[in-house]
Image: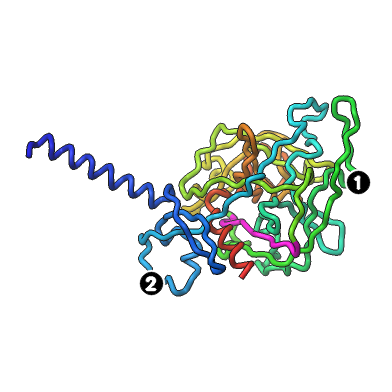
Amino acid sequence: MTAINISFLLLLLILAVRSHQRTVQGEQECTLVTHEGEESKGVLVPADQCTTFREQPENKDLRPTHPVCCAVFRSDPTCGRLSQYADEFSFDSRETQLDQFPWAAMVLLRRVQKLVCSGSLIASRFVLSAAHCFVDVRGTSKPATDYRVRLGDWDLELDEDCLYVRGQLVCNEQQPVDYAVERIISHGDFQRQRRDFLHDIALLKLAEAVEYGAQIGPACLPNWNVGVPLIAGQKFTVFGWGRTRSYSGVRRKYKIEMPGRNISACVRAYGLRAPEVPRIHLCVGGVYRKDVCHGDSGGALMRRESNRWVQEGIVSFGAYRCGKPLPGVYTNVAHYIDWIQWAIDVSSS
């Protein structure tokens, strides 16, 4: 065999190994069988990357590099719906359309009309939010019975939401609905006392299933990715009813656009030191007076695709005084797609 042939075979072997490595990193789908005997799709990854396998005691002796079929969250086919009035002119660019971002969730105190945090509806009984919303300053978890979730609202001061579009008054077909919270699952590694708020993600299970409609529908989540996200220069949108500055609230659902930044901007701004920060945090914003604020925590950071919206992040923390020219930190949703499915499965067991 000639030297050229040997070199060619070695090249093929290297390419095959690299292809296998990419497959193990999550590009190959696999099939799982649920406890109910139903089949579902998963992703082939090393065991140490899969939350489901890490959380099961019987798998503690499994080699970390052993490939396993990991359950990951799959978005509803109707997710990320664009507003039917998305291209209409608005005198206030911050004001959303009536049916825009129908997954927007308000997290309220159960007995008081007070906005605590925000969230996003991702399935008929599940709302995604931030873990820091549901623990006190000592890190103690608060009971699910303290909260309720409101879906389908737009103007907080009106019983019927209406807006002029093309010179005609258009009103919401669906009234806002409040749902009791049955259970809250926060990420096990979240620590309120840490300044970097690592793993700031929580899943709320509602007491009953949500009925989708014109004003209520699920968000799309991104594909699972445990690598370092490259978002500098990308355009993102956040929305909600939180304060527009440290002292002023809003009555209608507002939106703002902000640029993606390199994670180093947030590392410098907030002194972030943990090695996992580049993979689990997103750094966005930093434009004067264009910022999320109190009440927006747990809300969705969205990226517009051609025919849908995708939730890339969860509002986590930022400047003490809202509106300062400092970027904000968002939980990187793509990193937690397997954790989200694990939390759904745990809450249903």
Q: Position of residue 141 (x, y in %)?
A: 68, 68
Kind of element beneath mark 1: loop
Q: Is residue 157 above or below residue 163?
A: below
Task: Using a 10 Å C-alpha cutoff, classify the residue at mark 2 as few (fewer than 14 neighbours), some (14 to 19) or many (20 or more).
Answer: few
Q: Nearer the viewer, residue 238 or 180?
A: 180
Q: Earlier in the sequence, mark 1 or mark 2?
A: 2
Find numbered disc 2 in the image and state the secondary structure of the residue it sits on. loop
* Nearer to me, 220 or 284: 220
Three-letter amino acid code at the position of disc 1:
Glu
Does residue 241 show up? yes
**295 or 6, which lies in front?**
6
Marks 1 and 2, how far apart at CA: 57 Å
Q: What's the mark number on residue 157?
A: 1
In this orientation, does residue 329 appear?
Answer: no
Residue beneath the point at 85% across and 25% down: 166
Which residue: 56% across, 32% down? Answer: 233
Q: What residue sits right under mark 2 in the picture?
A: 61
Extent of the magenta region:
197-208
Q: Percent x, y for residue 312?
A: 60, 44
Q: Quadrant of residue 241?
A: top right
Identify which amino acid the numbered label 2 is placed on.
Asp
Magenta-span inclusion, residue 9: no
* Residue 203 painted magenta: yes
- 275 displayed left or right of 126: left
Determine the residue located farthest toward the bottom in the rendered image: 58
Viewport quadrant of the N terminus: top left
Q: Residue at x 50, y 63 (%)?
A: 33
Q: How is the image coloured?
A: rainbow
